[in-house]
Image (cartoon, rainbow, N blue to C red):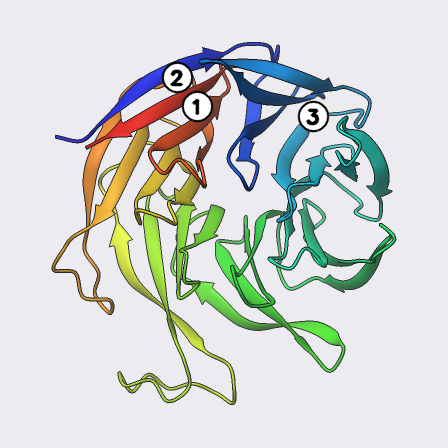
Amino acid sequence: MPRLEEVTTLEGHIEPVWCVSWSPFGSLLATCSGDKTIRIWGKEGEKWICKTVLTDGHTRTVRYVTWSPCGQYLASASFDATVVIWSRKEGEFESIATLEGHENEVKAVTWSSSGSLIATCSRDKSVWIWEVTEDEEFECASVMTSHSQDVKHVIWHPNKEILASCSYDDTIKLYKEDNDDWTCFQTLASHDSTVWKICFDQSGSRLASCSDDKTVKIWQEYLPGNEEGIVTHGSDSVWKCVCTLSGYHERAVYDINWNHVTGHLVTACGDDSIRVFGEDADSNKNEPKFSLMTMINHAHSQDVNSVSWNPKIPNLLASCSDDNLVKLWRYVE
């Protein structure tokens, strides 16, 4: 039977840890916390240690951190309504820009696959898109107010300039650029409560979502002219919910992450547990079946807030929790 083995526990944060984010090359892990700091962890010999603590970027909880595709920049989103961009080109992390404009807590930030666009989302119900210039300037290109409530997360498609967001209003929205402005081209509604997190698979043809309603949903993209006969409009694809995973989680599911190498999905839950799901071998893409591969009860002593697969070591997993701890796990088949 597959299992998760604990590799190590990383201590240092003194408040709940909200997010774990691997660098694109998998050698560094960034974490952020209610203690207003960001920690960068790396391996020395066989041990994982804290290499850097970034303390002067934010005045309130740091809710989210994410790396640029080139690995030279880190973006952090905070309850102080700002996003800070950090550069590590000189070896040390240095704050080079503060993105201001949101009226309220910023919940997430994400880089496009080209690194030329950043998206941010906030409790102020808005999604902002920023253009990154060659001389490290960051300019707001669009402000979208499609959601009616707090926007929890934003994520870019892995190979197209399509953005997805999810919200306290129970929906997921998809955006694209149209005539020099960004517009919402589809709203996905199937969850019964807050959608906390969304993630694309490696191909970008599937989206997974997790919710306060204790379910995980898999959405399939149907392109114009699809062989299934799903009706589309113009050049836009249509996304349909093709699978709901229910009955596995005892409380809200706060995070979900798709392993782009193995296809496994991992979830972080308010019941203090981590679960790994795999798609069945005989699964049909239009009616996929996923099975629970393994789970760790009491992976942390409080809510698990974030989980992330290492992009280069496919069986290495990071998690963090309200218990102030970061843990690394090895998935063993």
Q: Is residue 156 above or below residue 327?
A: below
- Mark 2 falls on what kind of element? loop
Decide which of tag 2 and tag 3 comes sooner along the chain.
3
Q: Which residue shows up at 16% across the image and 60% down it?
A: 283
Rendered image quadrant of residue 319: top left
- Mark 3 falls on what kind of element? loop
Is residue 291 visible in the rendered structure shown here? yes
Tell me residue 266's x, y (percent).
35, 38
Q: Mark 2, mark 1: which one is toward the viewer?
A: 2
Q: Which residue is mark 2?
A: 300
Q: Quadrant of the N terminus?
A: top left
**Front position in the image: 236 or 244:** 236
Is residue 81 visible in the rendered structure shown here? no
Residue 11 as seen in the image, left or right of residue 4: right
Q: Which residue is mark 3?
A: 61
* Distance between the alpha carbons at the discs numbered 2 and 3: 20 Å
Question: Amino acid under label 1?
Answer: Asp
Residue 88 as seen in the image, left or right of residue 260: right
Q: Which residue shows up at 18% across the image and 66% down it?
A: 284
Q: Which residue is mark 1?
A: 303
Tell me residue 330's x, y (percent).
32, 25
Question: Amino acid under label 2?
Answer: His
* Crowd rating for badge 1 (residues with CA inside 10 Å; few <14, some 14–19, many 20+): many
* Distance between the alpha carbons at the discs numbered 2 and 1: 7 Å
Q: Are the residues tagged 2 and 1 within 8 Å (C-beta)?
A: yes
* Crowd rating for badge 2 (residues with CA inside 10 Å; few <14, some 14–19, many 20+): many
Question: Amino acid under label 3?
Answer: Thr
- Mark 1 falls on what kind of element? loop
Q: Quadrant of the C terminus?
A: top left
